[in-house]
Amino acid sequence: MTQALTRDQATAAVRTALAGFATEAELAELPPGESLREALELDSMDFLTFVERLSQRLGRRIEEADYPRLATVDSAADFLTADR
């Protein structure tokens, strides 16, 4: 069983997984409720790379059915901190 993440840890994990798709400054300014795909112009392969990085960082599989829950920094943090 994986240890539960705090909201700050989840948000940091999401932003770290997005590294390389934007500069650090752009990621810092990214509104937490804005669509990641639109704001960072992620195509489907970029989004899959983000999901894989996040999954590896957290040591848990993220199912395809859960991808919509990773649409924004806020929604991803909600997903990652939700009781499973």
Image: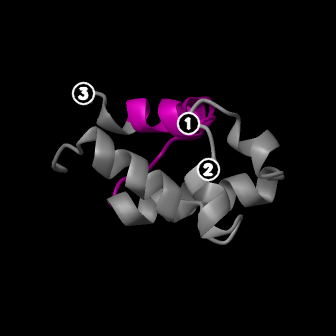
Residue plotted at (33% across, 61% down):
59
**Looking at the rendered structure, which numbered label has been put on residue 29?**
2
Earlier along the polypeptide chain: callout 3 or callout 1?
Answer: 1
Residue 79 located left or right of residue 45: left
Q: Secondary structure at mark 3?
A: loop
Residue plotted at (43% across, 65% down):
56
Which is more foreground, mark 2 or mark 1? 2
Extent of the magenta region: 59-79
Which is more foreground, mark 3 or mark 1? 1
Location of residue 64 in the rendering, given as x and y in whole percent from the top left corner: 59, 39
* Residue that label 1 marks: 32
Classify 49 as above or below 81: below
Name the amino acid type tagged 3.
Asp
Name the amino acid type tagged 2.
Glu
Residue 79 located left or right of residue 33: left
Split into 4 quadrants, where in the image is the C terminus?
top left
Viewer-proximal residue among 81 and 1: 81
Name the amino acid type tagged 1.
Pro
Which is more foreground, mark 2 or mark 3? 2
> Looking at the image, do the residues carrying marks 3 and 1 touch, with CB atoms under 8 Å apart?
no
**Alpha carbon of mark 2 to alpha carbon of mark 1: how far?**
9 Å
Q: Residues within 10 Å of mark 1 (few under 14, many from 20)?
A: some
* Residue that label 3 marks: 83
Location of residue 2 in the rendering, given as x and y in whole percent from the top left corner: 19, 50
Viewer-proximal residue among 80 and 65: 80
Q: Secondary structure at mark 1?
A: loop
Location of residue 24 in the rendering, given as x and y in whole percent from the top left corner: 59, 67
When asked about the image quadrant of residue 69, the answer is top right
Q: Main secondary structure of the magenta part?
A: helix
Q: Is residue 65 magenta?
A: yes
